Image: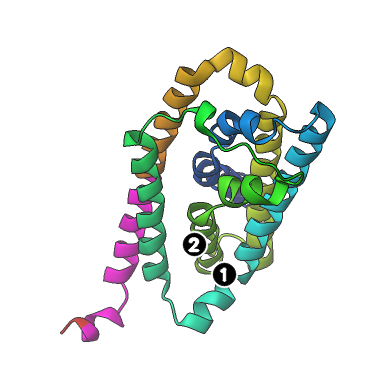
């Protein structure tokens, strides 16, 4: 029982650690004032709440459909992990070495509803986070510590916690932006970019390790 509880806690923590840097609500904090300038405080809070709900829905959908997608396109688990690692690393390098973000250059949306686009997608649940949850879906089937249904439930809990953290961050966007300033947000984003690179490289290492231990690979390599 204690082992199962430990595995649940470890899986939730791993989900949060993998998703939070790539969803990076602090980046959205820096562009939210420009996008929501036409909204009242109550409308902005409502849009933020809906965006986080949409984000959770998108990621859970891809988590549950990940195995079906892999079977349909005949994608192997090592291939998926390597591809996901490369995508995550790309976003990490972009955040670490890219140009500092300037909120004053963010487009000012004229639409009333900004919750789904651009807040939920691609700001919070873009290609990188989708690749991560699909990779987690494959991991649920390969691990043996938890039943498959409990593995999925544990990852879903991690996704919901990430969405909740994102909601808290965006809800406090005005205060947070005032405290951190442009330089503070850019500095934290670069730190998260470095963490993303580490996570992406580890995904690639895991994928290559799985590939080298797969007996099906060696006849093809001859």
Q: From the viewer's perspective, is residue 61 above or below residue 24?
A: below
Q: Which SS class for mark 1?
A: helix
Task: Please state which of residues 33 and 25 is positioned toward the viewer in this rendering.
Answer: 33
Horizontal and vertical percent position of residue 50? 77, 45
Q: Which residues are magenta?
A: 198-220
Residue 125 visible to an observer of this rendering: yes
Q: From the viewer's perspective, is residue 6 above or below residue 30?
A: below
Q: Is residue 201 left or right of residue 130?
A: left
* Rendered image: mark on residue 184: none
Of all residues, the one furthest to the front in this rendering is 110
Quadrant housing the C terminus: bottom left
* Rendered image: mark on residue 66: 1
Q: Which SS class for mark 2?
A: helix
**For mark 2, what is the residue?**
135
Q: Is residue 141 left or right of residue 36?
A: left
Q: Is residue 32 left or right of residue 103?
A: right
How packed mark 2 is, by other alpha carbons closer than 10 Å (few <14, some 14-19, many 20 or more), is many
Rendering quarter of residue 76: bottom left
Q: What's the residue at 31%, 56% (across, down)? A: 205
Horizontal and vertical percent position of residue 191? 41, 29
């Amino acid at each position: 029982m204690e082992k199962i509880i430990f595995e649940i806690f470890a899986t939730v923590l791993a989900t949060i650690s993998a998703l939070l840097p790539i969803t990076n609500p602090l980046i959205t904090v820096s562009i939210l004032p420009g996008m929501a300038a036409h909204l009242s405080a109550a409308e902005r809070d409502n849009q933020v709440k809906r965006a986080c709900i949409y984000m959770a829905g998108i990621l859970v959908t891809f988590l549950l459909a990940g195995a079906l997608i892999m079977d349909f396109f005949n994608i192997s688990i090592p291939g998926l992990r390597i591809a996901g690692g490369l995508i995550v690393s790309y976003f990490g390098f972009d955040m670490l070495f890219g140009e500092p973000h300037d909120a004053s250059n963010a487009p000012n949306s004229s639409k009333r509803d900004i919750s789904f686009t651009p807040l939920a997608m691609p700001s919070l649940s873009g290609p990188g986070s989708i690749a991560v949850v699909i990779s987690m879906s494959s991991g649920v089937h390969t691990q043996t510590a938890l039943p498959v249904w409990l593995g999925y439930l544990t990852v879903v809990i991690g996704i919901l916690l990430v969405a909740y953290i994102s909601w808290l961050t965006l809800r406090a966007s005005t205060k947070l932006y005032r405290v951190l300033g442009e330089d503070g947000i850019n500095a934290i984003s670069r730190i998260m970019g470095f963490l993303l690179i580490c996570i992406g490289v580890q995904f690639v290492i895991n994928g290559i390790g799985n590939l080298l231990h797969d007996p099906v690979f060696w006849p093809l390599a001859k």
